[in-house]
Amino acid sequence: MKVVVIGGTGLIGSKLVVELRERGHEAAPAAPNTGVNSLTGEGLEDVLEGATVVVDVSNSPSFADEPVMEFFRTSTSNVLQAEDAAGVRHHVGISIVGTERLPDNAYFAAKIAQEELIKASGIPYSLVHATQFFEFVGPTADEATWDDGKVHIAFYRQADPLTFAHVLVHESVHGFVHRFRAPPSLPSWVNEGLAETIASELVPRAARANETTNRARASLQQYSGMGGMLDARQISPWQYPVAETLCAFMIRQNKRNYVDFVVGIKEGLTWEESLEQRYKAPRDRLVRAYGESINLHGLKE
């Protein structure tokens, strides 16, 4: 079977070509140094002749906002059009785990645009979402190495070691929850509220619980409600204490129900459906009950 590898002389493509050939396939590396330029379309018609599968592992030479978007849109469109003309039967694209969670990242936005083009092409496809490559460890360490020869981690520890510990636990919870059971992500208010609640439990600080409740109450009064927090793609800074105290409230009501609430979301339910199943309550009742728990009567979203 003939497999054309777009970007076939690069970091991933060169390894893929070797692997395909070892398995008995005709692997054709397609890159500017083999006479194929996916950005201009040069050489695509010739290299795709007789191809059954195309694997596109090409990458943008620039990561700047406009050039990276232009590369993935133009290059992918050219490849897909040439595949259609050549009768290619399957397209394989490579992307990144979590692109949909960082749409403001220019590179991720460009990869999302590429995925959408592939999905809309009408050509049967597979999308491989990869994590970072081990090959990046060396350059990353080199960039973080100062004149003293030591690798410096880019994290401001702050004067209070407990604050540092709180952040470490918070981010570790995110990592665990992201990989827990199934791919679906938790809503931002659940994700951040749970991370803050666990960090507060594992890194206890005197009077923090009361301070957090007071900050949540003051913010809810200032903004005359929750400010759309329950539907926000990413909650605002002022909503963090609200999310934390709401999460803590739900856990106090029934810890087992809260665990099942999270599991339900990870297994594909919307958070409202999971709330109904585990707590037998709609969202407006949750908001009112939470408000009562912090002495804010008649709280609304």
Image (cartoon, helix red, strand yellow):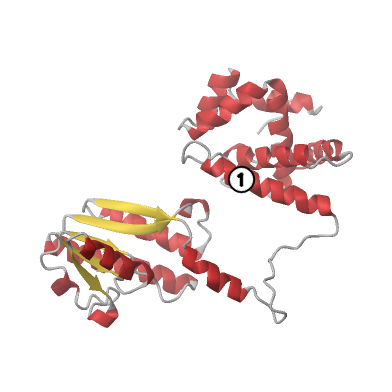
Q: Secondary structure at mark 1?
A: helix
Q: Is residue 208 above or below residue 143?
A: above
Q: Quadrant of the C terminus?
A: top right
Q: Nearer the viewer, residue 114 or 57?
A: 57
Which quadrant is the N terminus positioned in?
A: bottom left
Tell me where residue 188 appears, x and y as whole percent. Answer: 60, 42
Q: Is residue 123 left or right of residue 247?
A: left
Find residue 295 and report its image quarter.
top right
Residue 4 relative to residue 268: left or right: left
Badge 1: residue crowd in 10 Å (few <14, some 14–19, many ≥20) = some
Residue 297 in view (yes/no): no
- Residue 245: percent from left, percent from top: 74, 34
Left or right: where does residue 243 sit relative to residue 277? right
Point out residue 13 in the picture as x, y percentages from the top left corner. Answer: 32, 68
Q: Amino acid at mark 1?
A: His
User: 244 or 288, which is in the foreground?
Assistant: 244
Give the labeled residue for mark 1.
174
Q: Residue at x 54, y 67 (%)?
A: 137
The answer to whether residue 166 is above or below residue 276 is below
Residue at x 70% of width, y 24% of height: 288
Q: Say which residue appears at 35% left-offset and 56% top-offset.
A: 115
Q: Can the viewer see residue 230 in this picture? A: yes
Question: Residue 223's quadrant in the figure?
Answer: top right
Q: Single out the residue that lies furthest toward the front.
A: 22
Residue furthest to the top in view is 280
- Residue that sits furthest to the right in the current view: 206
Of 237 and 60, the residue lying toward us: 60
Relative to 72, does residue 190 appear above or below in the rendering?
above
Q: Position of residue 34 (x, y in %)?
A: 24, 80
